Image: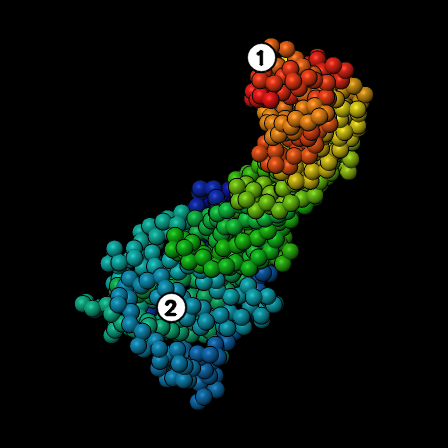
Amino acid sequence: MKKPKKIITGTLVVATGTVLLGVNNVSADGVNTDLPTNEPQVEVTATPSVSKDVTPTVTDKTDTVADSNPEETSVTSTVTNNPSATPQENVNAIVVDSESTVATVPLTETPDKVGVAEIPGNYLTYDENNKAAYVKGKIYSYDNMDAVKNSPSAKDDKVQVVSDYGHLTLDESMELTNFAADLLNPVRQSVWSKNGVSNDAWKFNVVPKSVDLARRVAGEYNKDNFSIITNNNHDYNALTRAYLSYGIGGYQENYGSSSINNYAARKTGSYQTTMYQLKKAVFDVIITMLYNDDTLQNGGASVMATNDSHSNSLLYGTEDPKKYGLQPNYLGVAVDSLGQVHIINLPLQYVSLNNSQFLENRANIDDIRMSGTDLVVRGWHAADMSYFQKNAYVILYDTTANSELGRVAYVPDSSNDVARVYPTIYGAEQSRFNVAFSLAGKDFAGHQLKFVLRYSDQKNGEGVYTDWWSDPYVFNANVGVVDAAYIQGSKLKISGWHAADASAVQPYRYVVLYDASAGRELARKRIQAVERKDVQNAYPRVYDAVKSGFAVEFDLSQIKKYVAGHQLQYVLRYASKENGEGNKTDVWSGKYSYKNEEYYIDSVGKTGSKLHVTGWHVADTSVNQKYAYVILFDQTKGSELTRIKVGDSSDSATSTLVARPDVVSAKKIYTDGKNGFDVYFDLAKLSNYSAGDRLQFVLRYSSDATGGEGSRTDAWTGAYTVYGTQNASNLDQVKISNDGLSVSGWHIADQSINQPYAWAILYDASTNQEVQRVTYKSAKRPDVKRAYPGAYNAENSGFSNVMFDKINIAKLKGHNLQVVLRYSNDLINGEGNRTDSWSKIFRI
């Protein structure tokens, strides 16, 4: 498809005369003028044919009701787009440029034989007596017509009330005009076919504007109260005003007086009648014009006679078909308040070449949106030329590339709202469209696109056509959002959407992982589309926005260049090449930094000297610091007691690395999945630990596999007092025997965790002297365990019959004695670090 060329029109110069005839346009009864001096607004490129000078011929017909008053003038034409053409080159046809938007129906060859007007079979019948068509003077009654008597529509006409025949509504005048066309079209077909015309150009074109023009003519006659009987002429002022209301500088009219309501031209009062009476009046006028007007031949009107202007105009479309050829016509019929019938018989090419107000071409784009890869456009297009150009198209045209992107034929849909605004445009009530263009693979982003609304006379949308061009639209959207970007397990998960018009020709979608801190790409992933109707709703004009969503994962454990804590960006990309390169359209996200850390101590317990701790620890930095440690720190002393790499064992600790899928799914922090720990510290083997000290756990990820130093990330827990300062005892029994003095009882002391040796010391409080000390082995005391469940080694706190055998019982009689129960780290003599519990005083 090519863009229309600049409009070039013919320039007509009036030579002589007071009434201007149109090029290739002739009158019926009355006056024909043609071609206003203003340039047309409808885009056409044509070479008009030119009439030669003729002598005006005026026929004064006073003996018939129908009037004939043709006047002609000479006209000269020059064509600006073909200066070498002679006036005779295009006498018989309009030259149509295939690139023009509006063209007229081509003229036929000039008739070379006299045609006979045949009687329309559906209304007119042969005179059975004379076996011939109507002859001059023959009186024929509309009421006696078989077609009328037997027609259901005629019966309806009799009850269809017309409230004011002098001011017909558009619908009433349209019905009357269609009736006249039905009456005349078979006659026209007959005479045209006798002159070698096989197409249907003979058909009268009844469009709202031609009917409205007739109504305007009748209205102007009403203003002037002009009687054709009294004045025996046309009301030229009324014709001028009516035609100029449509921007037409000339005029044409056939008129006749009728017998509406007993010759309403002489009647005053009510103007009410029926559609039957109106059609009868039109019938009488047309019969008079065709058969009782001028020269007749046997069997019909002499339509080629020199002065038979009415029949020539109505049947050939021109009063002189030998000069101007056969002319397709618009038809309009109306009646004024005096009952005078006005027949507007306007040649098509006259209007096509010279008046765009009559041939309106209106349209609007109501809505444009994308539906996936389709561009959907809704609107309406109403054009008078659609009467002849039946093929409706919407064409998508790229003005930037000067190329057509596609065209879609459609059947116009109902549009009553358009008809209410433009009631006189043909087809306005059936002008809506809703079509879709597939843009997949079309390079349109950033280009200026226009919609060409077209009616064409060919099924492919070419030939002769009428176009309406929309304003330009530019589709160059590129929008995208990262909805979420987080780490779960070892995967960096990114989701969001990216919609770009350029994706029509850049079909490969990627998310590129970019290290903004280091200024380098880390990885890229090709992604599959995810449906996002919310994006389509928010961006209805963006290409394939409904499939703009994405969700992608990067395994950070496999990206060697990734450094936790660096600022990352995500590049959302459409590319023309499969590897993500070539022409590309990118959206860069904001900057993200991942340096999160979280831990939890599930439990801290003790079993004997064993401190048991379980929990989990995750840190984004663990992607680079792969080794997990748990360090036992003595907060009281401010020093480390010991450390263990999780999964290893040592003299003072054992540990297990635990998989924690619950943590992986719950936390958006990097982990390889084995983030749990289960560690036992043997406090008895930590010489620098003291019961009562507050302990902390340091959870560490380190790059150092052997010592836990290097690059590291630590999480410090709260402080715990594992064993306090509990110290309690009791002497259950003291016995004197020949062997000495023995005692039984129990002793608990949290400090015994580092003071493992149990001693019993007999002390003479009377002399303040130690008598004897002995070591003993602890015995089970579950009762003490129950009484002191948190005390260190309470279940093994008992002792029984510990014997002091190196004493002089006699010397101790009467003295105040006590037993000192001791835990010491000194196996030899019970000194060193020690914890004592003194019994109550007793005597022998």
- Residue toward you, 600 or 219: 600
Q: Residue at x 39, y 64 (%)?
A: 174
Tell me if residue 449 comes above or below residue 358 in the rendering: above
Tell me if residue 237 comes above or below residue 494 in the rendering: below
Specify the label residue 176 is tagged with.
Answer: 2
Considering the numbered disc 1 on the image, is that residue within a helix, a strand or a loop? Answer: loop
Q: Name the side, left or right, on which 184 lies relative to 200.
A: left
Image coords of residue 138 (percent x, y)? 38, 80
Task: Give the label, 1 or 2, closer to the camera.
Answer: 1
Amino acid type, label 1: Ser
Residue under numbered circle 1: 766
- Residue toward you, 77 or 773: 773
Q: Name the side, left or right, on which 509 lies relative to 227.
A: right
Q: Residue at x 60, y 30 (%)?
A: 732
When asked about the image quadrant of residue 835, the answer is top right
Amino acid type, label 2: Leu
Tell me if residue 217 comes above or below residue 763 in the rendering: below
> Residue placed farthest to the front in the image?
810
Image coords of residue 196 (percent x, y)? 61, 67
When asked about the image quadrant of residue 809, the answer is top right
The CA span between labels 1 and 2 is: 148 Å
